[in-house]
Image (cartoon, helix red, strand yellow):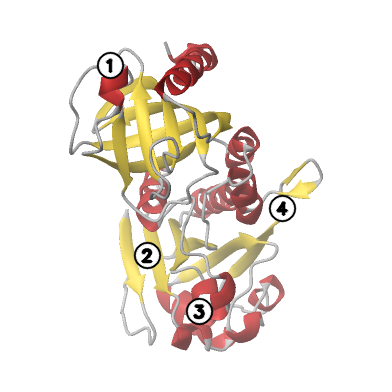
Amino acid sequence: MKTYRLYYPNDLSIENEPIALALGFFDGLHLGHQQVIDTMIEIAEEKGLKKAVMTFDPHPSVVLNPKMRRTTYITPLKEKEEMLKEKGIDYLFVVNFSSDFAALSHDTFVKEYLISNNVKEVIAGFDFSYGQYGKGSITTLKTYDEFNTTKVLPINENEEKISTTKIRELLLSDKLEEANKILGRPYQINGVVVQGEKRGRTIGFRTANIEPSGPFLLPSLGVYAVTMTIGADDTIYRGVASIGKKPTFHEDYKVTIEVHLIDFDRTIYGEEVSVYLHNYLRGEKKFDGLDDLIEAMTIDKENAIQLLEKFE
């Protein structure tokens, strides 16, 4: 997959073959996003076009709504890029969403970012908007003769539209399993194993401290049943993750991710890992002492083993 980073003004001359293009921010690449992208792939293969996706960076709220700006993501750009590569996308266009870009008329956006890139088919969700004040829509895209436009209708779950906003709400309110269902996969956080306080090994629960490798949205503080992969090895390890501030030991501390892997005793500092969150076990709690903490961690481990039986 070839990735192009586009800025305003768009003076990058790309002599690519005719393409079908899926348009959207696509944070999370959830089931709704997958329907848009799969529709694009189907059209591209039917018409002999290259498969392309156009996304934006940073999130438009950084420019358009600073009070509600979104600076953490379900799939940061690097992860989004990898997932699209795995789907066999030929071209990824990453448009820098700046103040100047946000001020473009919808017609200028179409001419300079779509038509100039040899787009012959445009596929987007029913609510996609673009151009200054969001005046561009699926309806305006359909007025251009240079390409065909396909509108993809929303997917609903329990009569509510699947959306990135909904998934974020679920992740932040102890509803991991519901979030995973509409994501279409377990929520994933990638990172690097770094040195920690090394307290876990003294109480029989050695942990790997994970430093996220990008601006991932961290779910609600608590304990989770997880699996983890290490580096390029596709071996799946089961474990328990604590995402929190260690209130038993600190009055005020940064949020950390610690993973205790079951039946695992290797030193893996510096390794790149992927942590997959399968089940929410309990909220973060301040314990009166080590004995209470160890008892709770033992129960957490037993619960995780039962929930993750299929990964044995």
Estimate how packed mark 4 is, as few (under 14), some (14 to 19) or many (20 or more) residues with alpha carbons within 10 Å.
some
Dividing the picture into quadrants, the one containing residue 263 is top left
Residue at the spot of label 4 = 154
Residue at the spot of label 3 = 63
Residue at the spot of label 2 = 17
Estimate how packed mark 3 is, as few (under 14), some (14 to 19) or many (20 or more) residues with alpha carbons within 10 Å.
some
- N-terminal of the two: label 4 or label 3? 3
CA distance separating discs 1 and 4: 43 Å
Task: Give amino acid for label 4.
Answer: Pro
Residue 146 is at least partly visible in this image: no
Q: Is 97 positioned to the left or the right of 135 in the image?
A: left
- For residue 267, above or below residue 104: above
CA distance separating discs 4 and 2: 30 Å
Of tags 4 and 3, the one toward the viewer is 3
Are the residues at dot 4 and dot 3 in contact (C-beta closer than 8 Å)? Answer: no
At x 32% / y 29%, what residue is drawn?
229
Task: Give amino acid for label 2.
Answer: Glu
Residue at the spot of label 1 = 264
